[in-house]
Image (cartoon, rainbow, N blue to C red):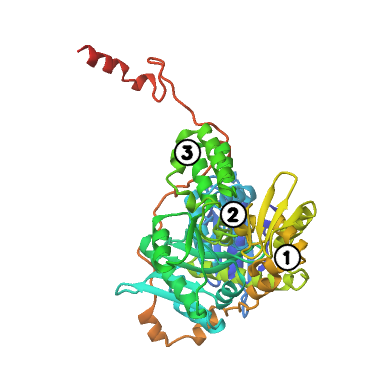
Amino acid sequence: MEDYNFVVGQEFADVKAFRNAIKEAAIAQHFELRIIKSDLIRYFAKCATDGCPWRIRAVKLPNAPTFTIRSLEGTHTCGKNAQNGHHQASVDWIVSFIEERLRDNINYKPKDILHDIHKQYGITIPYKQAWRAKERGLAAIYGSSEEGYCLLPSYCEQIRTTNPGSIAELFTSGADNRFQRLFVSFYASIYGFLNGCLPIVGLGGIQLKSKYLGTLLSATSFDPDGGLYPLAFGVVDVENDESWMWFLSELHKALEVNTENIPQLTFLSDGQKGIVDAVKRKFPNSSHAFCMRHLSESVGKEFKNSRLVHLLWKAACATTTIGFKEKMAEIEEVSSEATKWIQQFPPSRWALVYFEGTRYGHLSSNIEEFNRWILEARELPVIQVIERIHNKLMTEFEERRSKSNSWFSVLAPSAEKRMMEAISHASTYQVLRSDEVEFEVISAERSYIVNIGTHWCSCRDWQLYGIPCSHAVAALISCRKDVYAFTEKCFTVASYREAYSEEIHPIPGKVEWRRAGEDPVDDETRAVRPPKFRRPPGRPEKKRICVEDLNREKHTVHCSRCNQTGHYKTTCKAEIMKSIEQF
């Protein structure tokens, strides 16, 4: 408390500094202020408690902004008991208290604000006041939600100017020009996807939590090392079938402009109808699989049984129909209800052995990893969310480009590791040659047929993963073939470097946008307004999957009256049925 003691003659930089100091002292020392006079040249206040003699008077020095204390009378006899709230602890004061903390942690929660203020000052403030202070603090640091929408046209123009070939399209609705949709795809991402990545696209969305809500839709891929590769993203006012059709249409346009022939793609999603229909319509020649992570989480949530989840993954990863059927039989033993539930999803959409497209071993999309990029920024204005993605992309592209310069292998590290393991196992096999392309490879357990002309092995690993399996490697080495020449190009270091060869350039700050922008009058008439949807009051509902619950068997209720399962004694209808039969 010594930091808040005043003495006559003490000086402050200006009136604002003095007011802040006296307010801090009142809050820290738990007494209320009654301000008698306060303007730009003088300040006079006393303790608000009746009978307390404490007084303070300060004035501005002539020809300078400095404020000095002229008199300080009495000591507090009030007991300093202003602990359950404080009049000086206004929203503005709380904003000044939390501003630096908010810069470091966007998710600084109101309850943490309450805790920190009580810990430092010993006072309790209302939760709502802390919440308002956080909202105002975020707006002061990152701009308001309204400003975020208003600046979108200029921001999109900056993306197109600083990153030529990039797509940044803004769509509005109504006569009042309200925000509806935004699509962004950087040229570096489009080029890298078409020339270096796996032909797989994951689709998904995540809810935004700013004042006007909205949903971030995204399309991601895998680089040759299996890493996350964001391709395109967009923000929509409402996620529905129409918005997914629009997003896939914009994605198709972006790819079509940059290549003569769009590659044969495989899409991964949670299987919602809007996405399935949009993929079928906009990419009719593509394959579409359900994301196994999403499917397994749904099974875990529905049946609360971790063994079922484990067996489902085993069935999905099976490389033979026999292996798949064995795992499904085990699921049937654990729960026949689970089997019926799973059967609503055709195996051709999620099981590796039945899927007709090429997934290169990827059973799940990496949308969740991309969503983590903006998880902390979901409460910020939409323009800050986009900027967060842009900054992350810029950093990742540069880091991965530099990292790949130190690689001297033919394949990217994860693919090279798989190849080394295959070569190691291949040394233990016996190889019999049938003709120029067909071989029989004999292991300790069984024999396998390999055709190096069609890149085929009876174990199916080569076809499913795009990298020669150990049996194929044994056959290739036996006829002195280069095993790397029989690996899919999308796993090479050369493809990895191509994926990150284009740079994502920085975007200037807001001041530069306005300076290079259009006529202010024209801006006013074309200003983008927020959507009409706003965040509802109260705490939002959260859907959680409890990990502990996955290990818990589903509870079966038992009736003590009729000894049957599925209901309690109070809901038992046995007596009613018996009476009906007697009647």
Residue holding disc 1: 483
Residue holding disc 3: 339
Report the amino acid beneath label 2.
Answer: Ala
Q: Residue furthest top?
A: 582
Query: Could you tell whether 235 is left or right of 404 in the image?
Result: left
Q: Nearer the viewer, residue 515 or 279?
A: 279
Report the amino acid beneath label 3.
Answer: Thr
Disc on the earlier residue, 2 or 1 = 2
Residue holding disc 2: 26
Classify mark 1: residues with Cα within 10 Å, few (<14), some (14-19) or many (20+): some
- The nearer-to-camera label among 3 and 1 is 1
Give the Cα separation between the discs numbered 2 and 1: 77 Å
Answer with the quarter of the image where residue 528 lies: bottom left
Disc on the earlier residue, 3 or 1 = 3
Q: Please provide percent x and percent y for residue 330.
A: 55, 35
Q: Nearer the viewer, residue 409 or 379?
A: 409
Q: Residue furthest front?
A: 435
- The nearer-to-camera label among 2 and 3 is 3
Mark 3–mark 1 CB contact (< 8 Å): no
Query: Is residue 312 something one can see in this rendering?
Result: yes
Classify mark 2: residues with Cα within 10 Å, few (<14), some (14-19) or many (20+): many
Q: Nearer the viewer, residue 189 or 457?
A: 457
The residue depicted at 77 percent of the width and 62 percent of the height is 477
Q: Please provide percent x and percent y for residue 305.
A: 54, 36
Disc on the earlier residue, 2 or 3 = 2
Classify mark 3: helix, strand or loop.
helix
Give the Cα separation between the discs numbered 3 and 1: 41 Å
Classify mark 1: helix, strand or loop.
helix
Q: Please provide percent x and percent y for residue 63.
A: 62, 80
Query: Is residue 151 something one can see in this rendering?
Result: no
Labelled disc at residue 141: none
Report the quarter where the C terminus lies.
top left
